[in-house]
Amino acid sequence: IEIEVDGDTRRVHSLEAAVLNDGILARLFFPKGPDVRMDDGRVDVCVLVTRNVLDYARLAVNFVAGRPVTPHVLFLEAYRAIEIRSDAPLPVQADGDLVGATPLRIDVLPRAVTIVAPAGAERPADANIARAILVDPYLAGFRKSRR
């Protein structure tokens, strides 16, 4: 894939790139990654760089088994725009829903949304919460179907 962040283009061997603006998900998938925040005026791009199919399979097995996942990840910060292109169209998801295919352009719009929440509503990123929301429901269904 080819990723252009604020005019700087990189070409990497990867099938997975995440554009993140939520600390809980970022900490789950990339615990040693950047401090991803909704209010910092930037969007973080995390690209899973793989050398071969076995690298990708090993990461998936470790993640599902709850073992530490230490992939080679390219971290980029976007303050203006991101463009992701690929030789063949790849599916694009937004919050788990398919929304199209590459090529994709994302413009960064700092302070575009105002959120009102009670004092103390912000919580530190917790991998257990994210795992319970994202992974456990799928694992339960998978285990049931294998019985």
Image (cartoon, rainbow, N blue to C red):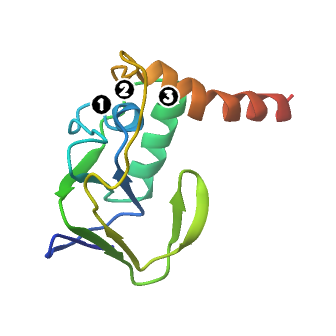
Nearer to me, 66 or 113: 113
Q: How many marks?
A: 3
Outermost residue toward the bottom in this view: 87
Q: CA distance from mark 2 to mark 3?
A: 15 Å
Of the image marks 2 and 3, the number of the one nearer the N terminus: 2
Q: Which residue bears the numbered disc 3?
A: 130
Query: Is residue 104 left or right of 10 when viewed as pictured?
Result: right
Residue 54, numbered label: none
Of the image marks 2 and 1, the number of the one nearer the N terminus: 1
Of the image marks 3 and 1, the number of the one nearer the N terminus: 1
Q: Are marks 2 and 3 in contact (CB under 8 Å)?
A: no
Q: Which residue bears the numbered disc 1?
A: 31
Residue drawn at x 54%, y 32% is 64
Work out which quarter of the rendered image holds the N terminus and state it. bottom left
Residue drawn at x 50%, y 73% is 90
Q: Which residue bears the numbered disc 2?
A: 68
Numbered disc 3: secondary structure: helix
Q: Residue 105, how many percent across, how many down?
A: 36, 75
Q: Amino acid at mark 2?
A: Pro
Badge 2, how many Cα within 10 Å: few under 14, some, many 20+?
A: few
Q: Are marks 2 and 1 in contact (CB under 8 Å)?
A: yes
Q: In the rendered view, would you say 25 is above or below 51?
A: above
Residue drawn at x 42%, y 63% is 15
Q: Amino acid at mark 3?
A: Ala
